[in-house]
């Protein structure tokens, strides 16, 4: 008698597991097929006040709350997920194996991450591990990112990837804003040949042909996820100008720039560099017309003035 | 004899009676469980059948056919229900995704007067401890409760960043907690996987590790490896020193290589490699 019940119970449990799995899959497939249309059609239902049927109103409230919470998480985590596909490969009382495919962005940086996660409920704790990890990143900022991505895929360190992505995107954003700011402020002198999201900024004055200053603002990411921005200055002078370079500005220019950076910080240092071009061109436009120009970019680091 | 036998028989009867009671209780429990499960199964089946009906309506939607027939009217609410349920499932999946990628799982408490955040840690794909913290937001941002280990320099980090930039504070804390969990995990792993190496010294913050290995050779020699983790945001040491009574051993190219290994890879991985190469026991 007991046995008969036990058998029935086991059979029912299996049936239920199967039906629940089917239901999840159906719901997910409905969302995949009709996601956009669905949100469009139901948007008014969900986001306006007013009832609707009893059952529906409970669902509507739940969906509203979940949307609110999702906005909260997106804001605090700094990561926006546009796509989320979940496939449950195995689900039992003590074990869950899922594959997830996520796509989204962190500020302007796009990513696509596929990973598999296994959860085993042991007596005292839930053991969870990432068993597969594939990452694709897209964007001009990522040109030196691949060593880090390979390492993170090998070590399955999903969390490190996102922590690093956040920090990296903050540094990229700082660079982009600074470059854009200077281009807007001094459009005749500053150019961004590869766009404001790249690492290059060139400072040139039409009054000083053949002379230019190129700033390389690199953002390095080590294999362990350490994000390190670094700035370098490259000076170019016309041969004519170089003849008069008694103060060896070509040689020492980049070192001067490094010292400036340490004292004034990035924005002020770049502003200083740009202004030398202006000062030059205002003061010496006469001379340059006569072709007798002596560029003598000497920064007095202590007083931050430019003298000849 | 009669008395004893009689007594024994009475006991036997009682015993059986209890067992009977036991059995009938258990039978009852099983019966109830079976009935509950049957009901659950039936409900799921009913929902699945209803979905089949909705498939017709779904088809209509995808073909942009009008949904205002009388037929569809009743089913329309059902359709909305299943669409909303699907939407809810997607939102829950997204919540889980944020959780799995190490999000802070921020929860508002006390009507917005405070928030609770979680710091998830992981090392080499294995999720480790989760640390929680409640932040009071009434006047300034203050930490009201947390379960971060006391050896952790939480106060100094909070003093530096918390008031200026909450997100930066969370990011720095998450970074350092993950590095800490990683270093601690390496000690566990090396104890588990490399039994021949003895941990001589380690501290709460796991930023110093002194190991004793046995170098292979004609006569096995004890080698002391000291790993200093100067950067608390990292799982790898900033300095490794090798000490041995036999100076030629610690200066040898093999041990110079071992020193690099210990600097460039996690402790347990480095030691396993060293053992595999026959450098240590």
Image (cartoon, coloured by chain):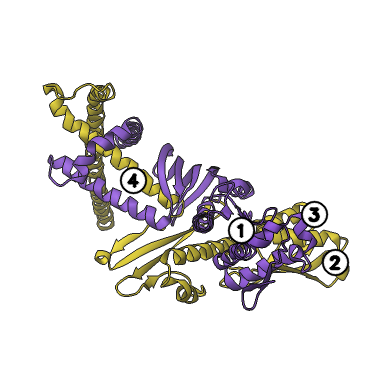
Chain colours: A purple, B yellow
Q: Nearer the viewer, residue B62 or A28?
A: B62
Query: Which residue is label 4 attached to?
Result: B92
Q: Locate residue A128 relative to residue B8 in the image: left or right.
A: right
Between discs 3 and 4, the one toward the N terminus: 4
Crowdedness of circle 4 by 10 Å Cα count: few (<14), some, many (20+)?
Answer: some
Q: Earlier in the sequence, mark 1 or mark 2?
A: 1
Distance, label 1 to label 2, CA atoms, is 28 Å
State the image coordinates of residue A107 (x, y, percent, origin top left).
Answer: 45, 51
Does residue A242 appear in the picture of this structure? yes
On the image, numbered disc 3 is attached to which residue? B278
Label 1 sits on residue: B189
Of circles 2 and 3, the one toward us is: 2
Marks 4/2: CA distance?
A: 58 Å
Q: Is residue B267 visible?
A: no
* Chain of residue at mark 1: B
The kind of secondary structure element at disc 3 is loop
The nearer-to-camera label among 3 and 4 is: 4
Q: Secondary structure at mark 2?
A: helix
């Amino acid at each position: 008698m007991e046995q008969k019940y036990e058998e029935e119970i086991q059979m029912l449990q299996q049936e239920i597991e199967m039906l629940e799995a089917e239901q999840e899959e159906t719901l997910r497939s409905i969302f995949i097929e009709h996601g956009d249309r669905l949100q469009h059609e139901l948007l008014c239902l969900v986001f306006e006040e007013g009832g609707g049927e009893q059952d529906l109103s409970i669902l509507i409230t739940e969906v509203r709350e979940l949307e609110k919470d999702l906005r909260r998480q997106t804001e605090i985590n700094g990561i926006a997920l546009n796509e989320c596909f979940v496939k449950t490969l195995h689900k039992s009382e003590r074990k869950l194996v899922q594959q997830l495919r996520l796509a989204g962005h962190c500020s302007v940086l796009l990513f696509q991450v596929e990973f598999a996660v296994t959860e085993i409920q042991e007596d005292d704790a839930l053991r969870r591990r990432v068993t597969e990890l594939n990452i694709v990143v897209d964007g001009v900022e990522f040109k030196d990112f691949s060593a880090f991505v390979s390492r993170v895929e090998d070590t399955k360190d999903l969390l490190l990837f996102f922590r690093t992505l956040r920090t990296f995107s903050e540094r990229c954003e700082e660079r982009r804003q600074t470059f854009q700011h200077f281009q807007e402020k001094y459009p005749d002198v500053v150019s961004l040949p590869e766009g404001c999201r790249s690492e290059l900024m060139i400072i040139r004055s039409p009054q000083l042909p053949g002379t230019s200053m190129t700033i390389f603002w690199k953002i390095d990411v080590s294999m362990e996820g350490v994000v390190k921005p670094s700035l370098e200055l490259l000076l170019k002078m016309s041969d004519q100008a170089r003849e008069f370079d008694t103060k060896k500005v070509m040689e020492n220019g980049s070192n001067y720039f490094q010292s400036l950076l340490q004292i004034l910080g990035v924005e002020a240092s770049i502003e200083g560099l740009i202004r030398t071009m202006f000062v030059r061109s205002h003061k010496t436009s006469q001379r340059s017309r006569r072709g007798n120009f002596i560029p003598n970019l000497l920064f007095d680091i202590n007083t931050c003035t430019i003298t000849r | 004899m009669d008395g004893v036998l009689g007594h024994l028989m009475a006991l036997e009867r009682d015993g059986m009676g209890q067992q009977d009671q036991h059995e009938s209780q258990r039978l009852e429990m099983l019966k109830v469980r079976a009935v509950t499960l049957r009901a659950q199964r039936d409900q799921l089946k009913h929902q699945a059948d209803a979905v089949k009906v909705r498939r017709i309506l779904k088809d209509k939607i995808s073909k942009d056919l009008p949904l205002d027939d009388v037929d569809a009217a009743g089913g329309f609410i059902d359709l909305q229900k299943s669409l909303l349920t699907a939407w809810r499932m997607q939102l829950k999946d997204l919540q889980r995704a944020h959780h799995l990628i190490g999000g802070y799982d921020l929860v508002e408490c006390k009507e917005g007067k405070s928030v609770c955040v979680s710091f998830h840690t992981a090392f080499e794909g294995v999720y480790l401890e989760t640390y929680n913290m409640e932040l009071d937001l009434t006047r300034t941002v203050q930490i009201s409760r947390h379960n971060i280990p006391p050896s952790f320099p939480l106060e100094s980090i909070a003093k530096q960043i918390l008031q200026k930039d909450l997100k930066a504070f969370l990011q720095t804390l998450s970074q350092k907690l993950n590095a800490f969990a990683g270093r601690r995990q390496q000690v566990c792993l090396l104890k588990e996987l490399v039994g021949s190496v003895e941990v001589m010294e380690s501290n709460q913050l796991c930023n110093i590790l002194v190991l004793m290995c046995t170098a292979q050779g004609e006569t096995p020699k004890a080698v002391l490896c000291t790993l200093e983790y100067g950067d608390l945001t990292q799982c790898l040491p900033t300095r490794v020193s090798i000490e041995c009574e036999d100076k030629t051993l610690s200066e040898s190219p093999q041990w110079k290589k071992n020193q690099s290994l210990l600097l460039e890879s996690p402790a347990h991985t480095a030691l396993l490699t060293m053992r595999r190469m026959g450098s240590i026991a």
